[in-house]
Image: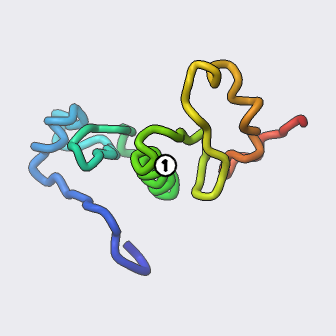
């Protein structure tokens, strides 16, 4: 990684064995681009698979890791809405939240590179 070390494990799968285990190995010998976020208990919390011509968004992957770490640190007592970043609004999970996210969180809080018109 340019400018510093990668603060989490990354793998190279030259033989395709890991790609085959996760279902992203192409028989032609090329793995699809896959990102798997696996928690300390070994449970896959998130994955993204893309064909080779399209790259992944590293910033989004790091944002997701931070969100999963936050949820884990609160033992599920707080959940993170779309585009959440540290210091932004978190939500309390529960039946009262269903259909009411918009009362507690606004789209304008989402971190996005895409300009989305927001009416308030």
Between 60 and 94, the residue placed more toward the observer is 94
Which percent across, then down, holds residue 47?
Answer: 36, 38
Judged from this view, the residue extending furthest toward the bottom is 3
Residue 10 located left or right of residue 96: left
| Location of residue 97 (image quadrant) | top right
Question: Going 25% across and 36% down the picture, which residue do you hit?
Answer: 24
- On screen, residue 39 versus residue 104, left or right, reads left
Q: Residue at x 31, y 44 (%)?
A: 36
Task: Report whether residue 104 is seen.
Answer: yes
Q: Position of residue 100 (x, y in %)?
A: 70, 23
Residue that mark 1 sits on: 67
Task: Name the image colouring.
Answer: rainbow
Report x, y in % for residue 77.
Answer: 49, 39
* Image quarter (top left, top right, bottom left or bottom right) of the C terminus: top right
Residue 56 visible at all:
no
Name the one closer to the observer, 67 or 25: 67
Q: Secondary structure at mark 1?
A: helix
Quadrant for the N terminus, please. Answer: bottom left
Q: Counting other residues with Cα less than 10 Å from the Cα at mark 1, is it few (<14), some (14-19), or many (20 or more)? A: many
Q: Residue at x 28, y 45 (%)?
A: 38
Q: From the top left corner, tell me how far across and down residue 34 is, in percent.
A: 32, 43
């Amino acid at each position: 990684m340019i400018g510093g070390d990668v603060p989490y494990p990354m793998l190279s799968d030259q033989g395709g064995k890991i790609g085959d285990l996760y279902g992203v190995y192409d028989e032609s010998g090329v793995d699809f681009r896959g990102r798997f976020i696996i928690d300390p208990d070994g449970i896959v919390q998130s994955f993204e698979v893309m064909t080779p011509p399209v790259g992944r968004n590293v910033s989004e992957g790091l944002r997701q890791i931070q969100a999963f770490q936050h949820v884990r640190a609160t033992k599920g007592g707080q959940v993170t809405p779309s585009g959440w970043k540290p210091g932004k609004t978190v939500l309390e999970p529960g039946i009262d939240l269903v259909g009411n996210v918009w009362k507690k969180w606004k789209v304008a809080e989402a971190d996005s590179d895409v300009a989305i018109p927001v009416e308030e």
